[in-house]
Amino acid sequence: MLVHRIAYMSFPGHAGSVDTVDSKKMNTDYLLSKALELLTSVLDDAHPDEAVPPELAADGQFSQLYRKLFVIRSFFFDISNGKLDTQLKEKGFCAGSLKNFQADLRHLIWQTKCVASNDFTQRVHFMGEFSDAFNSMVQQLQKSTTDLSRSREEYRVLSETDQLTGLLNRRAFFEMGRLVMERASVQHIPVSLIMIDIDFFKKMNDTWGHDAGDSVLKAVGEALMSSVRKDDITVRYGGEEFICMMPGSSVSVARMMAERLRTAITQTSAESCGGERCITASFGVAYYLYTGENYVDSNTALETLIKKADIALYEAKKNGRNRVCVYEEKDTPEKMSLL
Amino acid sequence: MDNKRRFIFSWDLIGDIELGRPNLGRTTSIEAYRLMQFTFRDVAERHFGYEKTEQMFYEAGQLAGKEFYRHVVAPCSTWTEFTGKICDAFRSMGIGIVRFESTDTENNVYTLSVAEDLDCSGLPELDYEVCTYDEGFCSGLLEEFSGKPFKVKETECWCTGSRTCRFRATPAV
């Protein structure tokens, strides 16, 4: 019908003439062939003509159909190339299905962005086999991320912990200690530090062996942990030395705490030390309070505090061990330089 | 005639479905839903005209969206939680398949589409969008979640030959 109509419109002088039946049929065949060629080119060719040839353009319906196919083809091409913001105004089953597919893809992009920002609740329910694959990927990603976070946390704990005693190690102490000193300077709060050294540890090691030495270290670590407050920072500083840092504590509080720790350690026994033997330790206490005049950076402040506690510890050792000594500001600068 | 209001909406009007429908349960047919919507729309249009009826449907949808958020979706503390719950609720209740396509949370501009929409999917092509109730519904959901008013416009509809309904939400002036 369409081609007949085109034939009529293209060759109106011939239409209806009995003498020209063959000619009309020839023209109809020609137009039909031309229309098929054009429609095929829209489906198959990489660069079909956008314009309808004049002999076919006479039919408005055909031109409209061709233009519609051409627009749908362009839209389809855009989607196949990942260009998803093209607007298609055409209607009908094919155009509608493509628009639906476009909406699916745009939603998938949105969902993928959500997953990329750690939203693992995203699931696809409307794209058959792809839905299963996507959902499985997101679940796996969530599991991997959770495992990774757990591993990272385990490694962090491992890297900050002394394996023998379970206390913080020296590296972690310096990181935390610097923060404490910084906050103390800003907020003008005192910080006390107790340095602890197990008495005659070398002799214990030499007499009863390293295993016995290790059990002494563990027993002292447990005694410290069970005596300090939750905000105090308890560290195995190295060898048989321990530190207890007490943010917000005055020197008198720190002295009392040191006495309490000393008593706790004397009540500790390490079974492997040739039976139950008494363990003792010496304590040096030092104190820091930013007054507005003595400002130094947090690194220097921490190192100075440790040095002062070490001086006091030296005094405790010198005066017979198993005792607490507090650093006095009058303690000589020469002692500082000795350390 | 007594003009006293009798149907100020409250969630109680949904009723106790378990009690009232022990055999038929919670579901009904799409035909029944659409029969009610489009006959109501027909009569309302005859009485009040097209524009007023559209406004009524938009506002009714808005009210429904707010109530739906309060009773079905809430609480949501994040946008992510909100979108996830909306998608799940629409799907499980057979309202449609919601697909968020873009979310500009800075400017509060959102594009979402609903496939297999309860209101319109499968209707004949009509040359105009019909999901006015859905527009209001989306607006109510967004407003109740964010505390800010939204204007929602359907830009594509099954009835305009799109086989999916697309909505664009922007801050209401």
Image (tube, grey):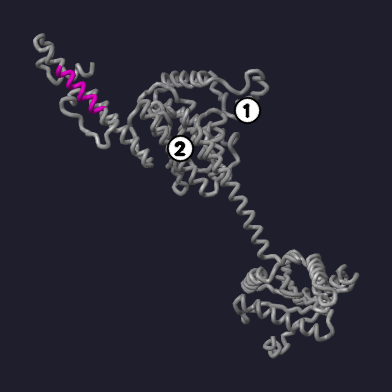
Q: Chain of mark 2?
A: B
Q: Position of residue B86 (x, y in %)?
A: 54, 36
How far is the residue under mark 1 from the one under mark 2?
A: 30 Å
Q: Position of residue B130 (x, y in %)?
A: 42, 27
Secondary structure of the residue carrying tag 2 is strand
Amino acid type, callout 2: Leu
Task: Give residue B112's mark.
Answer: 2
Q: Tell me: residue A171, above or below residue A112.
A: below
Report the residue that reaches farthest toward the top: A18
Counting every numbered tag in the picture gives 2
Q: Is residue B77 magenta?
A: no
Start-end of magenta stretch: A26-39
Q: Residue at x 49, y 18 (%)?
A: B35
Q: Is residue A37 magenta?
A: yes
Among the two numbered marks 1 and 2 on one chain, the one whose residue lies closer to the N terminus: 1
Amino acid type, callout 1: Asp
Disc 2: CA contacts within 10 A as few (<14), some (14-19) or many (>=20): many
Which residue occupies the foreground of this view, A271 or A16?
A: A271
Quickly name the residue at label 1.
B12
Q: Main secondary structure of the magenta part?
A: helix
Q: Position of residue A318 (x, y in %)?
A: 81, 86
B54 vs A257, left or right, is left
Q: From this viewpoint, is residue A118 visible? A: yes
Secondary structure of the residue carrying tag 1 is helix
B43 vs A254, left or right, is left
Q: Position of residue B7 (x, y in %)?
A: 57, 25
Q: Tell me: residue A250, above or below residue B69.
A: below
Which image quadrant is residue B165 in? top left
Q: Chain of mark 1?
A: B
User: Which image quarter is the C terminus of chain B in?
Assistant: top left
Q: Tell me: residue A79, above or below residue B38.
A: below
